Amino acid sequence: MANEILSYLEMCQREKMSLQRGMNFRAGDNYSIILMSQRTNAPYRDRIEDDGTTLIYEGHDEPKRNDLPDPKKVDQPAVTNRGTLTENGKFARAAEQFKRREGRAERVRVYEKIRTGIWSYNGLFHLVDSWVETDGRREVFKFKLVAVDDETFTSDQQSGDLESTRLIPSAVKVAVWRRDGGKCVRCGATDNLHFDHVIPYAKGGTSLRAENIQLLCARHNLAKRDRIE
Ligand SMILES: [Zn+2]
């Protein structure tokens, strides 16, 4: 479920793979996986727009190699020197196919790094666009992804409830994690944690301020939802 907090190991166990790269086209049976970060020292510039429903994700460089120029100083490639598509190329092709109405939007699960070893599941997105732009020194890929209802949670969620598809800004997540000490504010549990809206988004609560977000374990998160619905 979106806003769930996972260790790196839990994230890999859930996806049944060792997630070493940020971009993983079709890593799942019918979906892709990307890892994002908005931390100040993050290697790529990912940003959230449109009140938390749109992610603009930067493409990735090829791994560093001694016999090739510094990947940070050359345009991000769509094709490797062996002639196969890079992850940039695969995601860009999927976005082009969607824009030409040759297929459904690629489904992408997005995980976000909160701090070392701590990740948040940001939910399921559709890849709807891609382009190349200059960052002032070189050309980089950009991918536009829009949040959609989380497939793992639709059965016990009212339709039209966008709460799980509103992204909580990273700075808020980091502040909440610190303030609550990485523990459920009700019982002190340190596993199965979620970022919970104190006042639900649907009832006017904001995602943008730490005062309205708290850490809850799965049990207390569900108990609260039962009471509200
Ligand atoms: Zn709890």
Image (tube, rainbow, N blue to C red):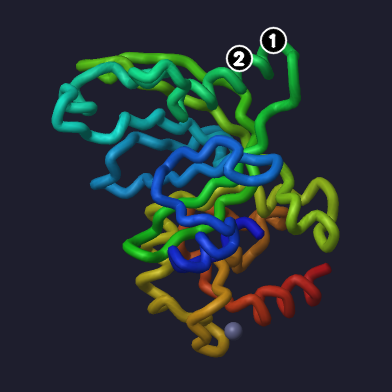
The local secondary structure at tag 1 comes to loop
Image location of residue 151, percent across then percent down: 75, 50
Of the pair 213 and 135, the residue shown nearer to us: 135
Of the pair 144 and 105, the residue shown nearer to us: 105
Identify whether 154 is placed above or below 190: above
Circle 2: is it few (<14), some (14-19), or many (20+) Cα within 10 Å?
Answer: some
Residue 57 lies in quadrant: top left
Q: Which residue is mark 2?
A: 96
Image location of residue 111, percent across then percent down: 51, 51
Query: At 77% from the left edge and 51% from the top edge, which residue is drawn?
Result: 161
Q: Classify the position of ligand 1 by quadrant: top left, top right, bottom left or bottom right.
A: bottom right
The amino acid on which the numbered mark 1 sits, given as a three-letter code, is: Arg
Q: Is mark 1 within 8 Å of ligand 1?
A: no
The local secondary structure at tag 2 comes to helix
The amino acid on which the numbered mark 2 sits, given as a three-letter code, is: Glu
Query: At 50% from the left edge and 59% from the top edge, which residue is drawn?
Result: 120
Q: Which residue is mark 1?
A: 100
